[in-house]
Image (cartoon, grey):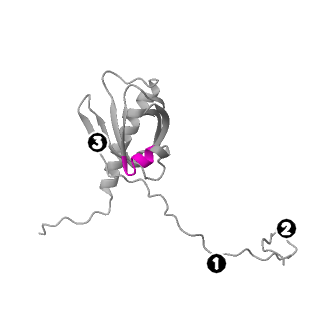
Amino acid sequence: MSDSTPESLIPYDEIVQEALRDVVGRVLSEVESSGGQLPGGHHFYITFETRAAGVSIPKHLSERFPDEMTIVIQHRFWDLKVGDDQFSVGLSFGGVPSTLVVPFGAVTEFVDPAVDFSLKFQANAPEPPEDHDEPDNDSPEVAVDDGSNVVSVDFTKKK
């Protein structure tokens, strides 16, 4: 008998990570449905990757936190909205009100210190597409009148 474990064809790690992220979404949804009121002494520290696809934060914050950022949901937050794949919340940074949009896939940690509860994740939000040069080999098609109902437009300059 072999001591090595066979490679799984079922992505258990991904399934578990997704299920645990659902915990974060459900908790935030309950706060949203209560009108933004946190029960008892509950409050949350949410850490996320600032460069993950779908994250939307003000430029001054992305410059200050180029890789990762932790926000606190406690006393001063507003407009908490929770969707299937992301949440948005209003927070103030240095007296400047800001709205943040964070996909659950970008979250790397969720902590509720009031009850000593924490979850850590591997960020799995898709990477934003890399910047690249526009292709220079594409040129517009030449218009051809073939009697059909399709209209072609020729964008080439006439000399």
Residue under the image location 80 percent in, 72 percent down: 154
Q: Callout 3: 10 Å neighbours few (<14), some, many (20+)?
A: some
Q: Answer yes or no: do the residues labelled 2 and 3 have beta carbons within 8 Å?
A: no
Q: Amino acid at mark 1?
A: Asn
Q: Answer yes or no: do the residues labelled 3 and 1 have beta carbons within 8 Å?
A: no
Q: Which mark is residue 137?
A: 1
Q: Answer yes or no: do the residues labelled 1 and 2 have beta carbons within 8 Å?
A: no
Q: Nearer the viewer, mark 2 or mark 3?
A: 3
Q: Which residues are drawn in magenta?
A: 61-68
Distance between the alpha carbons at the discs numbered 1 and 2: 28 Å
- The mark that comes first in sequence, 1 or 2, is 1
Residue under the image location 49 percent in, 43 percent down: 58
Q: Which mark is residue 119?
A: 3
User: Which quadrant: the C terminus?
Assistant: bottom right
Residue 76, picture quadrant: top left
Residue 107 image offset from top left, x and y in percent: 37, 46
Q: Secondary structure at mark 1?
A: loop
Tell me if residue 6 comes above or below residue 102 in the rendering.
Answer: below
